[in-house]
Amino acid sequence: MRSREFGRTGRTVSEIGFGAWAIGAGWGLVDEADALAALNAALDRGVTFIDTADVYGDGRSERLIARVLKERGGDRPFVATKAGRRLPAQTVAGYTRENLNAWIDRSLKNLEVDRLDLVQLHCPPTDLYYHAEVFGHLDDLVKVGKIADYGVSVERVEEALKAIEFPGVVSVQIIFNIFRLRPADVFFDLAKKRNVAIIARVPLASGLLAGKFKPDTRFEETDHRQFNRHGEAFDVGETFSGVPYDVGLAAVERMRPLVGRGTMAQFALRWILMFDEVSTVIPGASRPEQIESNATASALPPLSPAQMEAARSVYDRFVRKPVHDLW
Ligand SMILES: NC(=O)c1ccc[n+]([C@@H]2O[C@H](COP(=O)([O-])OP(=O)(O)OC[C@H]3O[C@@H](n4cnc5c(N)ncnc54)[C@H](OP(=O)(O)O)[C@@H]3O)[C@@H](O)[C@H]2O)c1
């Protein structure tokens, strides 16, 4: 497993990380044994970056991570969590010093640590980036030692551009994959200049880019790929990366012949790793064999310029129109 620097934190993390949403909730039932096996598989394969949130399974994801790390002992991986989604409704006014303190205290307890490696604001409203006082509260939490660093998880590229104007923001988590190119076009250069870490989330477009779905594939009722296809519960961009399902299936068929060595999922992950501005890619997975396969993407040879160009032309032909200007 290759590593990359995590912005200016002085930390180095595995270039393939582990997205711990599915072991919390939101992806159908993942029982405890499967969740523990998934986490252990990631750590066995050299993953040293875990992304979670206080709301994934209402703390279940954080607590399972704490349990596995305690059982295993040894060097701790970098654990990034998120705060802000415990608010009953997303308003800037909800991001008070008191609320941030309470959310972070809860994550400290769930993760069983004295200091969090990284807290990311969890897709707050765009207007929050015009409220410097919120970043002041986070600076104070760094000063008192409750958090080592903070960053943001964003929906829109413009939020990322604004967020990194605040000097304390060390990382930006953003959707980036073969079906979501705008971050590379307008944000990556600036992030690199400021030495801001980039966490690429939803790298497989919720599994679509693994090339295994069919027009009649059904998901459990408690799986967002069933209940959030049109943004019924949260931003539609988080489900299949915002690509309409039938469009995604057609684009995947055009992408399939481009895959050289490895599987289609590995191709999708290797494609992201071609961007050296990205610090870590965080595929979610709840099965050890998927984790094994995802980790192996780090060892694949670079994609050729022809593969990169062909992937972009599939994007231009199918995905650009429904997606490019939305985020
Ligand atoms: N707002 C935010 O900050 C936010 C939002 C979304 C995600 N995230 C973070 O980003 C992480 C990754 O995003 P994501 O989980 O939404 O999407 P993703 O990584 O694009 O897709 C994950 C899903 O793809 C399937 N999969 C994974 N590896 C596979 C493989 N090798 N072969 C075939 N299928 C495979 C699995 O589902 P099945 O096997 O069930 O098909 C898995 O649950 C999350 O876990 C979370 O940590 C953050």
Image: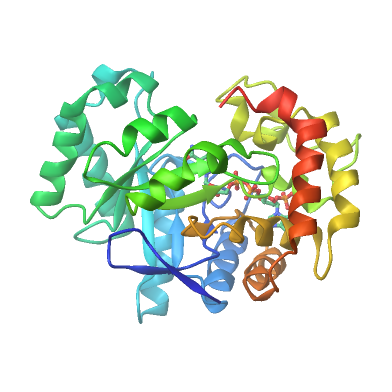
- For this orientation, the residue located farthest to the bottom is 74
What colour-coding does the image apply? rainbow
Give the quarter of the image for residue 75. bottom left
Q: Nearer the viewer, residue 293 or 304?
A: 304
Above or below — where is 226 with respect to 198? above
Q: Position of residue 29 (x, y in %)?
A: 65, 46
Q: Position of residue 252 (x, y in %)?
A: 84, 44
Give the quarter of the image for residue 11. bottom left
Q: How many marks?
A: 0
Q: Is residue 84 visible?
A: no
Left or right, 37 with respect to 198, comes to right
Above or below — where is 156 with respect to 184? above
Point out the image quarter for the N terminus: bottom right
Instruction: Report the residue at 19% width, 27% height from top.
Output: 132
Point out the image quarter for the C terminus: top right
Q: Is residue 268 visible?
A: yes
Q: Position of residue 100 (x, y in %)?
A: 22, 35
Left or right, 85 with respect to 104, comes to right
Instruction: Report the residue at 45% width, 47% height from top.
Output: 189
Above or below — where is 146 with respect to 302? above
Q: Nearer the viewer, residue 240 or 66?
A: 240
Q: Position of residue 116 (x, y in %)?
A: 26, 56
Above or below — where is 18 with respect to 83? below
- For this orientation, the residue located farthest to the left is 144
Instruction: Report the residue at 79% width, 57% height from top.
Output: 307
